[in-house]
Image (cartoon, helix red, strand yellow):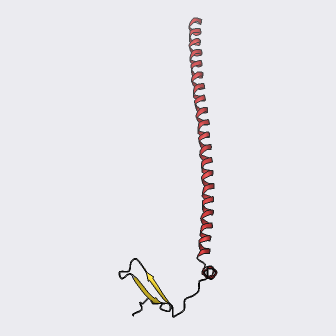
Amino acid sequence: MSRMQSARRAREMKLSRALMAVFAVVLLVCVFSQIALMARLSGQNKQAVSIEREIRSLTAQTDNLRLSLNQYHNLDRIAARAQQLGMEQPTETQIRVVNLPALIDGTSTQSAENIGAEEMMD
């Protein structure tokens, strides 16, 4: 009987070692995959932070551009700039000529006081 028991024990030891080796391999694969996943997550986190930073920068740039655009639409600023350039309001006796590509007749002549955009007749 001891021979059978020793053979059985040897088989159990072999099986035990094989199972331990399989367990060690599975454990190593799990550890490496966990490390790979953490590295991937870290890379994605860095990319997300970078994109959020870029979004904040672009949002600030958009706000600055809107502010600049609003400053250029300020009528008082436009009037002051026109005066600096030597421009002045037209008098009622002056004539203005409007040439629009959509007009069939070509040009339109109007007086400065004519705000209804009716043409002057000769």
Residue drawn 58% across and 34% down? 33
Residue 105 in the image: above or below residue 52: below
Question: Splitting the image into 4 quarters, where does residue 55 fall?
Answer: bottom right
Q: Position of residue 21 (x, y in %)?
A: 59, 22
Quick one: 46 or 63, which is closer to the camera? 63
Quick one: 54 or 5, which is closer to the camera? 54
Q: Quadrant of the C terminus?
A: bottom left
Residue 120 in the image: above or below residue 46: below
Q: Position of residue 54 (x, y in %)?
A: 61, 55
Quick one: 120 or 23, which is closer to the camera? 120
Q: Quadrant of the N terminus?
A: top right
Residue 62 in the image: above or below residue 13: below
Q: Position of residue 4 (x, y in %)?
A: 56, 8
Q: Residue placed farthest to the left in the image?
A: 104
Q: How many marks?
A: 0
Residue 50 in the image: above or below residue 88: above
Q: Position of residue 79 (x, y in %)?
A: 61, 82
Q: Is residue 73 left or right of residue 113?
A: right
Question: Splitting the image into 4 quarters, where does residue 27 fall?
Answer: top right
Residue drawn 60% across and 28% down? 28
